[in-house]
Image: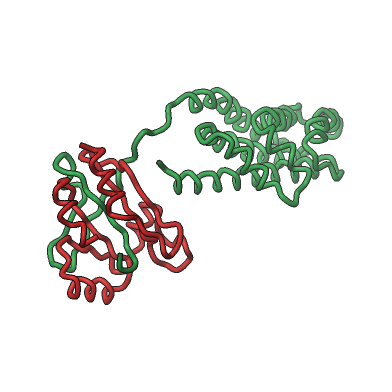
Amino acid sequence: MQRAKAEFDATGVQILAISTDNLNGPLAMAARDGLEFPILFTALDPSIPQAYGVFNLFGDGLASASVFLIDKQGEIAWKSIGKNYTHQVFPEEIIEQVKKLN
Amino acid sequence: MGAVFGRKNRVLIAISFVAALLLLTVACGDNLSGPSLTSGQQVGAAPSAEAEQPSSAPTPGAATPAAVAAVGSESKSNTPPATATGAESKPDASAAQATGADSKSDTPPPPIATAVSKSDTSSAVAATETATPTGTPVPAPAAVSETPAPTSLPVLVNTPGPVAMLAPDFTLPSIQGPEYTLSEYRGKQPVLVVFYRAYW
């Protein structure tokens, strides 16, 4: 994600990363990787991942790794919801979807 | 688009179907005092309930039309899952199949299912209270709630599905400090909302 930050910037998309984990993970991650996009945290409040339908899909009380592309009209134009623990969306795939918006 | 939401809805619809059908089975079984579980027997048994109740109940047959209406509308609207209710071991699987066959037409059934379950309970109440005169006002709302269900069904079926879904708004603090609100980006630029649980 961080690697592709420049490419995301070029497409004009705003990245909002939401952590539903406890804060140790993202804090350590941001400190280590020097992330340039905002990392929001829910303080273990599941309401937002629940609203997006990604909460607790694996019965572990966490949101599954998922990406929602929201267009300028505020509508979900594309999404990728993690089907398992190791689910990964490659930045190239996301960028391709972002470019479809324009 | 709404893969997860749709799946939840299907599960809810399947559950409501099964609940309504079980209610109907119980109500008919109580009325007939027989182990009639298949829908064919239910539908065929409705006239016998109609025939029994006026003889045993002094009240005018207000209760029996509700029962007949419940059974009739149930057999009309729920035919695919109803045929499988005889095998009580897996009614939800067949109901899920029936509702899952068309993702757009499975939205309308809930009002019917609820209407059927409502009328089931009220007709069951009416059937149990056949001797008392209080049974007469009960079927009236059941008959009323029964009528809009078939008319609303085609309307809902013909409505086009949602093309896009408005993203749920949120305002969250960030570990960098400022709060971010999703709706602030509306009309300005697209947003990539990323839920993550590990490094990627």
Q: Residue at x 72, y 27 (%)?
A: B65
Left or right, B22 with respect to A14, comes to: right
Q: Residue at x 31, y 73 (%)?
A: A22
Q: Residue at x 78, y 31 (%)?
A: B43
Of residue B173 and residue A84, the one placed in the foreground of this image is A84
Residue A61 lies in quadrant: bottom left
Q: Split into 4 quadrants, where in the image is the N terminus of chain B?
A: top left
Left or right, B40 with respect to B186, comes to: right
Q: Colour of chain A?
A: red
Residue B22 sits above or below residue B195 on the image: above
Chain displayed in green: B
Of residue A28 and residue A45, the one placed in the foreground of this image is A28
Q: Split into 4 quadrants, where in the image is the C terminus of chain B?
A: bottom left
User: How far from the left and from the top, in percent, is residue A63?
Assistant: 38, 62
User: How far from the left and from the top, in percent, is residue B109?
Assistant: 57, 35
Left or right, B117 with respect to A36, comes to: right
Colour convention:
by chain
Residue B27 lies in quadrant: top right
Left or right, A13 with respect to B47, comes to: left
User: How far from the left and from the top, in percent, is residue B79?
Assistant: 69, 32
